[in-house]
């Protein structure tokens, strides 16, 4: 019974993708990883010419179409990884394209021995899926790639090479199935202690601990002319009703969508955190004038999501060193003021914004 529960828990693990990229966000750790994925994307171009240079069970027009599709996919994914982090769905499509290309290369070879090499190339995308995505996605990939390898092994056996088929199948099982499973379990275990120490595992945003750490880093690294500081506190209206009506899974999807909306509608310099169940806090070095526009944009964007929720938004602005020589104390006071403003918006009916200017309040 205990083993069954562990397997069910493993099967039900949330996707790693959001919080893995959130973990890589500080100190520009995303760039080296994205650069590697750019290189991986360009390698898709190799599959087509490689199959074209070898005897395959495909006439020239379909072969040309196959090459064209792979080159187009390589260009698209290379551009996407070079300019941004892909969404979770795009990331799965990226890995699936790799596996489909390798599968086509494996089964189309007239010599099944050459098909083995294509099957071994499954390990690249399989490892990526294990590290970045859920157990369900990983096992779906394992079933698909095992079916392709089985096809190649049967062809090898029928070609009079059963020993090679057995050896290749064992190597494939170890490298392309067992290694990704071990990697996926390891990432999950490490993620509980390391990644989730500063990041919310559901949304990928910072948690309270991460928010405090990144805020200190922001204050320590600010330039002398970075004097404007602003905080935005957000509480979702009618979120409890959403959970009660549609279930907690639906509520989780709403929280993930809100987190994505907050990232999309704030600057890269913003520190975005989930501070409570349905509460969020944002801090950035922006002046009061653009702060009002950002708050309005966030409120409208959350209200436009396909969930029956809106947002109560509170903001607070402050010019550093104006009334408090301790920037950390100023930040803490700023967050408290934004929180109070948010509750004022909620008491007024929600789906609105309240503003606080600490500089004016202390004069």
Image: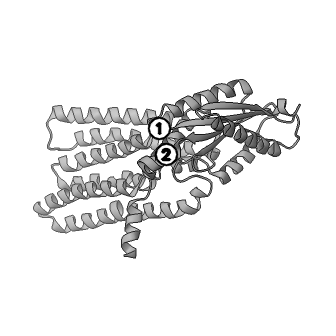
Residue 321: image x %, image y %? 86, 36
Mark 1, Cα crowd under 10 Å, few <14 / some 14-19 / many 20+, is some
Residue toward you, 168 or 11? 11
Residue that numbered label 2 is attached to: 241
Position above or below: 27 against 14: above
The quarter of the displayed image where residue 315 is located: top right
Residue toward you, 111 or 243? 243
The quarter of the displayed image where residue 183 is located: bottom left
Q: Secondary structure at mark 2?
A: helix
Residue 73: image x %, image y %? 34, 35
* Residue in view at x 35 percent, y 40 percent: 44
Q: Is residue 335 visible?
A: yes
C-alpha distance separating marks 2 and 1: 9 Å
* Residue in view at x 24 percent, y 46 percent: 105
* Residue in view at x 27 percent, y 42 percent: 50
Residue 48: image x %, image y %? 28, 39
Name of the residue lying farthest toward the bottom: 1
From the viewer's perspective, is the residue at label 2 or at label 1 nearer?
A: 2
Asked if the residues shown at circle 2 and circle 1 are in contact, with their CB atoms under 8 angstroms apart, the answer is: yes
Which of the two labelled residues, at mark 2 and mark 1, occupies the earlier sequence position?
Answer: 2
Residue 47: image x %, image y %? 30, 42
For the N terminus, the quadrant is bottom left
In the image, 333: left or right of 234?
Answer: right
Residue that numbered label 1 is attached to: 308
* Residue in view at x 67 percent, y 48 percent: 211
């Amino acid at each position: 019974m205990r083993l069954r529960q562990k397997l069910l828990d493993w099967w039900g693990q949330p996707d790693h993708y959001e919080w893995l990229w959130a973990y890589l966000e500080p100190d520009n750790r995303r760039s080296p990883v994205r650069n590697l994925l750019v290189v991986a994307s360009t390698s898709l171009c190799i599959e087509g010419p490689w199959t074209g240079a070898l005897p395959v069970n495909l006439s020239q027009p379909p072969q040309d179409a196959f090459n064209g599709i792979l080159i187009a996919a390589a260009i698209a994914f290379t551009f996407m990884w070079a300019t941004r982090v892909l969404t979770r769905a795009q990331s799965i499509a990226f890995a699936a394209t790799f596996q489909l290309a390798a599968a086509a290369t494996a089964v189309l070879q007239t010599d099944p021995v050459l098909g083995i090499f294509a099957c071994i190339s499954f390990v690249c995308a399989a490892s990526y899926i294990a590290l970045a995505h859920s157990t369900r996605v990983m096992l779906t990939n394992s079933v698909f790639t095992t079916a392709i390898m089985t096809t190649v092994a049967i062809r090898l056996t029928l070609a009079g090479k059963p020993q090679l088929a057995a050896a290749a199948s064992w190597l494939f099982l170890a490298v392309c199935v067992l290694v990704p499973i071990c990697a996926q379990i390891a990432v999950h275990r490490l993620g509980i202690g390391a990644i989730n120490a500063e990041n919310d595992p559901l949304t990928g945003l910072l948690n309270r601990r991460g928010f405090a750490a990144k805020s200190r880093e922001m204050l320590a690294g600010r330039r002398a002319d970075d004097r404007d500081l602003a905080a935005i506190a957000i509480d979702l209206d009618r979120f409890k009703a959403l959970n009660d009506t549609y279930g907690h899974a639906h509520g989780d999807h709403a929280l993930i969508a809100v987190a994505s909306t907050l990232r999309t509608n704030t600057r890269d310099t913003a520190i975005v955190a989930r501070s409570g169940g349905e509460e969020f806090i944002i801090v950035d070095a922006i002046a009061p004038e653009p702060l009002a526009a950002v708050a309005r944009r966030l409120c409208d964007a959350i209200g436009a999501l396909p969930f029956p929720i809106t947002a109560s938004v509170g903001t607070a602005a402050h010019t550093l060193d104006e009334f408090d020589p301790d920037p950390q104390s100023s930040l803490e006071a700023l967050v408290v003021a934004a929180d109070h403003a948010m509750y004022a918006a909620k008491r007024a009916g929600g789906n609105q914004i309240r503003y606080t200017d600490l500089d004016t309040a202390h004069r």
